[in-house]
Image: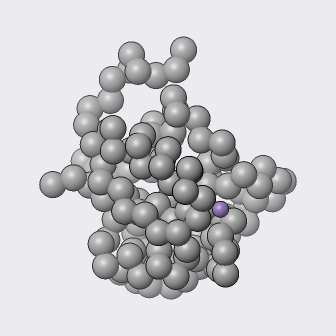
Amino acid sequence: MKLKILLIEDHEQNRYLASFLLEKHGYAVVSAADGRTGIELAQTIKPVLILLDIQLPLMDGYAVARELRRDPALRGIPIIAVTSYAMVGDREKSLAAGCNGYLEKPINPDSFVREIERFLPPKQKGEPHDPSLDSR
Ligand code: MN
């Protein structure tokens, strides 16, 4: 069975690119376009990792992360913040809200999956990684 990654992202093109890259590496991607839907999906599908856009409508990613962290059943799931707000303090705010890591947009297709897999235990990684596919 494929490992599930939950992607909470309101921008369709970003969802498309992230899903494409992750599916290519053997993951199943479940997407949500807003935080509330994302939290409900996290509780239902129990993903191995959550990718969380910070700039979301209605409820921002920090609020989503804090709510995810309040659920004991979800506490062990790594949350990676993904944001184009490359501002001083964003990383700290993400970590303070309960995220385990932080990636800046735009997504780099050559390193995206590898960066995410740093947050997964070895047994939860997708297909074996081929170093020849890495960026040079
Ligand atoms: Mn967004």
Task: Classify residue 56 as left or right of residue 121.
Answer: right
The percent position of residue 115, horizontal first and vertical second, equals 50, 40
The front one of 56 and 99 is 56
The quarter of the rendered structure image containing the N terminus is bottom left
Q: Which residue in the rendered view is the most extreme toward the left?
A: 1
Q: Quadrant of ligand 1?
A: bottom right
Q: Is residue 88 left or right of residue 42?
A: right
Q: Quadrant of the C terminus?
A: top right
- Is residue 79 shown to the viewer in this render? no
Q: Which residue is painted at 66% across and 75% down in the image?
A: 57
Q: Residue 59: horizontal and vertical position, in percent?
A: 65, 80
Task: Please indicate, yes or no, whether residue 74 appears anywhere in the rendered image.
Answer: yes
Is residue 20 positioned above or below 97 on the image? above
Residue drawn at point x = 58 percent, y = 64 percent: 10
In this orientation, which residue lies closer to the viewer: 113 or 17? 17
* Image location (x, y in percent) of residue 5: 37, 58
In the rendered image, residue 51, in percent from the top left (x then y), is placed at: 50, 59
Give the residue displayed 48% in from the left and 49% down from the top. Answer: 16
Residue at the spot 39% in from the left edge and 74% down from the top edge: 42
Q: Nearer the viewer, residue 33 or 124?
A: 33
**Residue at the outermost front position:** 12
Please indicate whether residue 72 sits to the left or right of residue 70 in the image.
Answer: left
Location of residue 61 (image quadrant): bottom right
Which quarter of the picture shows residue 132? top left
Q: Nearer the viewer, residue 30 or 74?
A: 30
